[in-house]
Every structure is written in structure tokens, then in C-alpha cells.
Image (cartoon, rainbow, N blue to C red):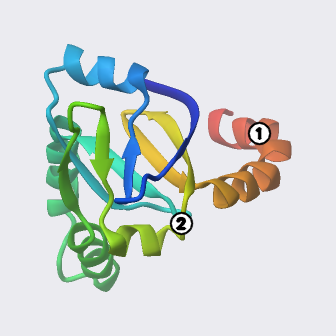
């Protein structure tokens, strides 16, 4: 559903433009509302409402008696913000999420199948440079 890498910059109000290709997908799926939360590897995850509800059901099934499940759910859901694109395709990223992802100005917006990830540009470059050489090894480990 969401694929590709797009470079953008936050505006003075802390908003970022969602790539036009992603906005087209939103329209096709009648998605108006999105959820942004703390992601893994110090990025932000953006989910459509449909995918968010699916993830929420999965996480709700995790036993709250397990410490890891409680900690993960607290961090994941307490960080969530409901956002809507304005007419120019911008969303406001709350300050606490920008702080979590070390986002100051330049961002990379990454399509990862059923979700969008928003990275500080420097963090994405660091992640990509560290992992691009392991792409084939990862494929072997995951698919063999």
C-alpha cells in the first residue's frame, strides 16, 4: 500500500507534508484520520484508522500480566496522537513525538507496506547506511 522514500521539511508550525502518492492512497481507502505514535528504531509510525484498529486488537490480546506487554502497550498507546491532513496535505506532529524521534527540521517519510514511518533525516541515513549491506543476509535469515 505505502512504498518509497520521500524527503520533506517541517514547517514553522511543526507540520509535515504527507507525500501526494500517500494522500492518493488515503483517498482511495476513504482514510481521513490517522494515528501517529512512537515507532521502533527511533522513528514514528503512522497508521490509517483501519490498520490502527487492527494493531490495537492484536496488542489487546497480549496478556497484561506480562511485564513486557504492559510496558510496550504503555509506550505505544500513550504516545499515540490522532491526526488529520489539512487541505495542503500537512499533519501536525506533536512536540513529544518529535522529541522521541529526534526530529528537528529535515525528515524522511518512508512507506513500509501498511504503515508510514517518519524519520529524522540524519537518523534514517544512519539506519540505512548501517543496514544496507545486510539486506541479503536479512533476506536469507527471514525467508529460508
Mark closer to the observer (1, 2): 2
The residue at the point 27 percent across, 70 percent down is 79
Of 5 and 60, the residue lying toward us: 5
Residue 46 on image: x %, y %: 34, 47
Extreme residue in the front direction = 12
Q: Name the secondary structure under disc 2.
A: loop
Q: Nearer the viewer, residue 75 or 35?
A: 35
Which residue is identified by label 1? 135
Asked if residue 50 is positioned above or below residue 120 in the image, the reply reads above
> Which quarter of the image is occupied by the C terminus?
top right
Mark 1 vs mark 2: which is more N-terminal? 2
* Label total for image: 2
User: Which circle marks residue 2 in the picture?
Assistant: none
Foreground pick, 54 / 10: 10
- Residue 31 x/y as whole percent: 16, 29
Residue reaching furthest to the top: 28
The residue identified by callout 2 is 104
* SS label for mark 1: helix
Residue at 80 percent of width and 36 percent of height: 136
The CA span between labels 1 and 2 is: 29 Å
Quadrant of the rendered structure where residue 28 is?
top left
| Extreme residue in the right direction | 133
Q: Which quarter of the figure has residue 30? A: top left
Answer left or right for 76 relative to 105: left
* Residues at circles 1 and 2 in contact by the CB criterion of under 8 Å: no
Mark 2: few, some, or many residues within 10 Å (few <14, many ≥20)? Answer: some
Residue 100 seen? yes
Residue at left offset 45%, top offset 74%:
100
At label 1, counting other C-alpha atoms closer than 10 Å, the crowd grade (few under 14, some 14-19, many 20 or more) is few
Residue 93 spot, x, y in % from top left? 33, 59
Determine which quarter of the picture holds residue 72. bottom left
Residue 108 location in percent, x, y? 57, 45
Amino acid at each position: 500500500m505505502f512504498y518509497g522514500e520521500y524527503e520533506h521539511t517541517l514547517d514553522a508550525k511543526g507540520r509535515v507534508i504527507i507525500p501526494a502518492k500517500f494522500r492518493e492512497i488515503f483517498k482511495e481507502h476513504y482514510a481521513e484520520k490517522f494515528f501517529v505514535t512512537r515507532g521502533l528504531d527511533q522513528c514514528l509510525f503512522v497508521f490509517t484508522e483501519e490498520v490502527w484498529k487492527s494493531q490495537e486488537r492484536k496488542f489487546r490480546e497480549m496478556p497484561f500480566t506480562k511485564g513486557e506487554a504492559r510496558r510496550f502497550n504503555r509506550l505505544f498507546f500513550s504516545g499515540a496522537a490522532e491526526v488529520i491532513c489539512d487541505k495542503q496535505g500537512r499533519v501536525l506532529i506533536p512536540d513529544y513525538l518529535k522529541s522521541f524521534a529526534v526530529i528537528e527540521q529535515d525528515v524522511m517519510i518512508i512507506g513500509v507496506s501498511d504503515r508510514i514511518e517518519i524519520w529524522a533525516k540524519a537518523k534514517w541515513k544512519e539506519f540505512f547506511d548501517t543496514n544496507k549491506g545486510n539486506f541479503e543476509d536479512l533476506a536469507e535469515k527471514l525467508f529460508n
